[in-house]
Amino acid sequence: HRRCRTRPVTPEEGLRSRLRISIALVLLVATHFAYAVPQGLEFEMREVVRSVDDCDPDAEGCSNIALRYPQILAGPSPWSQQGLPELILGMVAASGVGGGDAEVGEPEAEFEVFAAEVRTFRSEFPEMGVAWAIDREVTVLHADERVVSLMLDEYSYLGGAHPNTERTYRTYDINTGDRVQLYQLFTPAALAD
C-alpha cells in the first residue's frame, strides 16, 4: 500500500531525502568495489568560472557559471582515453540553460549560451534584478579495471521561484563505454533475495 502525504514536502525535507538516497548509492558502490582510482586512469580537475559582464562572482547580483570536471590524462583502454573525455564534457554541457547546445569539448561555449540567456532575461524583465547561477561538477567516484562511476552534481538558479539541485550517477564499462545498469553489478542470486 502506498502512503500519501497530507502536507507538501518542504524544501529541507526534499533535500534531506535526496541526500540520504545519494549517500546510500555511494555506499552501495563503495562496498561493492574497492573505493580507489586505479593507476591506469589518471585525471586532473579542471574548473571554468565565468561571470556575466565580468562582475565579481561572489558579489550580490552577479550572474555566474562554474563548471568543474575531470580532464582525463591517461586511461587503461582506448575508450577511457577518447570516449570518456567526450562523455564527461557532454555531461558538463548537457544540462542547465544550454540544454546541451554547447559543443562537446568546449565548456566555454556553455557559458556563452548562459550569458546570452541572462542578457535576454534582463532585457525582457529589467525590474527583476535577479542573479542567475549554475554550479555544475562531474566527479569520478570510482574506477577500476572494469568500470568507471561518475557523479554529476548541479545547483542552478535561473530566475524562477526557487533554485534547483540535481545529482545523477552513471557507471560505464571502462573498456567498451557501455552504460552499466545497477542490476548488472549483482549476481542473479543476490537479485532474487
Image (cartoon, rainbow, N blue to C red):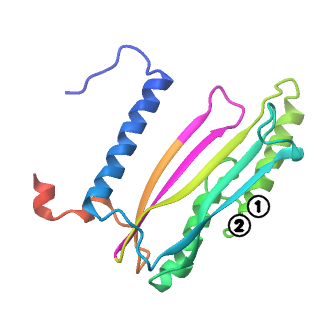
Q: Residues within 10 Å of mark 1 (few under 14, many from 20)?
A: some
Residue at image x 46%, y 32%? 15
The quarter of the image holding the N terminus is top left
Residue at image x 88%, y 28%? 126
Residue at image x 36%, y 73%? 144
* Residue 57 appears left or right of 86: right
Image spot of residue 159 (x, y percent): 72, 32
Res 103 label: 2
Image spot of residue 106 (x, y percent): 72, 67
Check disc 1 and report its element: helix, strand or loop: helix
Give the residues drawn in magenta, as a range: 146-165
Is the stretch drawn in magenta largely helix, strand or loop? strand
Question: Image quarter for residue 48?
Answer: bottom right
- Considering depth in this image, is 117 or 57 the residue closer to the camera? 57
Asked if disc 2 and disc 1 are in contact, CB closer than 8 Å, the reply is: yes
Image spot of residue 43 (x, y percent): 55, 71
The three-letter amino acid code for the residue at tag 2 is Glu
Q: Circle 1 is placed at which residue position?
A: 109
Residue at image x 25%, y 61%? 32
The residue positioned farthest toward the bottom in the image shown: 78
